[in-house]
Amino acid sequence: MTFESIIRSQRAREPVLSGPLGPFIDGFVQEQVAIGYAPSSLYGVILGASWFARYLRTIDVTDVRQIRDCHVKDFIATLPVFKCNGGKNSMHSVRGSRAARSLVKHLRIKGVVPPEPVAVNSYSWLLEPWITFLREHGGLADGTLYNYRSYGERFLQHLAEDAMPDRFGALSPARVREYLQREAARFALKTRNNLVSSLRSVLRFAFSAGYIQCDVASTIGHVPCSSLDRLPRGPKWEDLPKVLAAIDTDTKPGLRDYALLLTLMTYGVRAGQLASVRLDDVHWREGQIMFLAAKGGRPISAPLTPAVGDALLKYIREGRPATEARRVFLSLATPFHPLSGRSIYNVVSRAFRLSGVASPHRGSHAIRHAWATRAFAQGHCLKTVADLLGHRSIESTRIYTKVDYMQLRQVGLPWPEEVQP
């Protein structure tokens, strides 16, 4: 199959074939065909690639080696914008944006387009040694390090020229407080606490390394934020069967979503843990299922219940695409990507919406909250629930004891009787 066999219009083909991408477009087409796109999807990808090729001609890119990521970004900005999620969000045309990224990636793998030059971060002089220190001595997870770095880099960008090594040493507490007061007003309490913790960490490191003259970190106040100041925000356990019942298991998407939801409800794992489950992690003969560790916690090995085993087996045999991918849960449209944690959240949220079950939150973590609350109601001890949830610290599990009403009644004091004078 060739580009000309897909794009039949001579007028549409000519700008592509005569431009810098002309000699390489058929190779890109063959790669997309090998992925296994349906005819309509394949047409959309190739059409989007032709849009990008024509755009390059309009900006006078005459050599394929001139293509950079900024060209892809600028091209996407020219695409039509569509409203989604009831008009709350907007996004550019997926057809053009996905095709442009895929085409540039294909050309880079082939060695035609050079790698994107590594941008030199002007704040690396402080950010790199700080993050390295936290990784090696703080034992923080990669996700936490990413968030810390984001907060730190945003602060340094605010300082602008004053964040350069020759001027950073004069940083004053008043400058830090002014930034925090401005930023904190935009965030919820927990996010404010994360912001303050990140700035205190980077400033404490800068002082100990000699980059600033005074201990600015000690002047930053703490955000009063207790880890147990809220209740678990999930649905009632008794309502979860209604969520399962809302799934149409006569369809391939329904088989996948039912197996996904039932696994979440049975084991209470996080969305990311479920997304990472591979076919090799389901040990059918031994009756075990494995989940990777998450957020610095512990990996989980749990019995494979008959209900979950049957649901997974039915999905794998009748609903899962025939592909070499080893992840259990995949998208149902070519090229059959593994579901991400965000995709699993969307599946759960859609099931809640279809079922009409009321819940403060309607994502995968809401099911985890309901699962842990039920575990305590069944009489499981704190350590057992912590192990089943994969928590590294038992303190992370204590929030669920706040809704264990049967146990709380046992420690409640009787109401004092009125004493007559």
Image: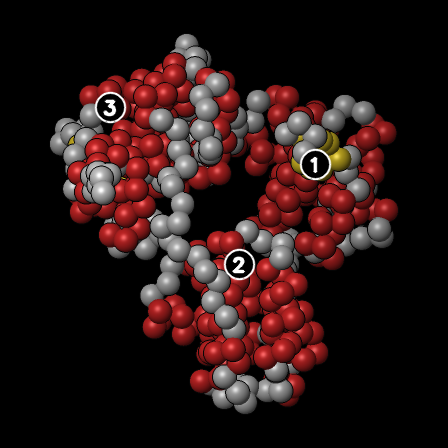
Q: Return the disc, 3 or 2, that comes first in the chain's sequence.
A: 2
Q: Is residue 136 visible?
A: yes
Rendered position, 165 above or below 140: below
Measure the alpha-carbon separation of dots 3 and 1.
39 Å
Of 220 and 40, which appears nearest the observer?
Answer: 220
Mark 3 falls on what kind of element? helix
Residue at 55 percent across and 78 percent down: it is 125
Q: Return the disc, 3 or 1, that comes first in the chain's sequence.
A: 1
Q: How many marks?
A: 3
Which disc, if any, is residue 309? 3
Q: Return the disc, 1 or 2, that comes first in the chain's sequence.
A: 1
Q: Which quarter of the figure is the C terminus placed in? A: top left
Question: Could you tell me if the residues under marks 3 and 1 are in contact, i.e. CB atoms within 8 Å?
Answer: no
Mark 1 falls on what kind of element? strand
- Residue pointed to by mark 2: 192
Look at label 3 and name its amino acid: Gly
Q: Residue 160: x and y, percent? A: 69, 74
Q: Residue 306: x and y, percent? A: 20, 21
Measure the alpha-carbon separation of dots 1 and 2.
27 Å
Look at label 2 and name its amino acid: Arg
Residue at 70 percent across and 78 percent down: it is 161
Residue at 51 percent across and 22 percent down: it is 353
Look at label 1 and name its amino acid: Ser
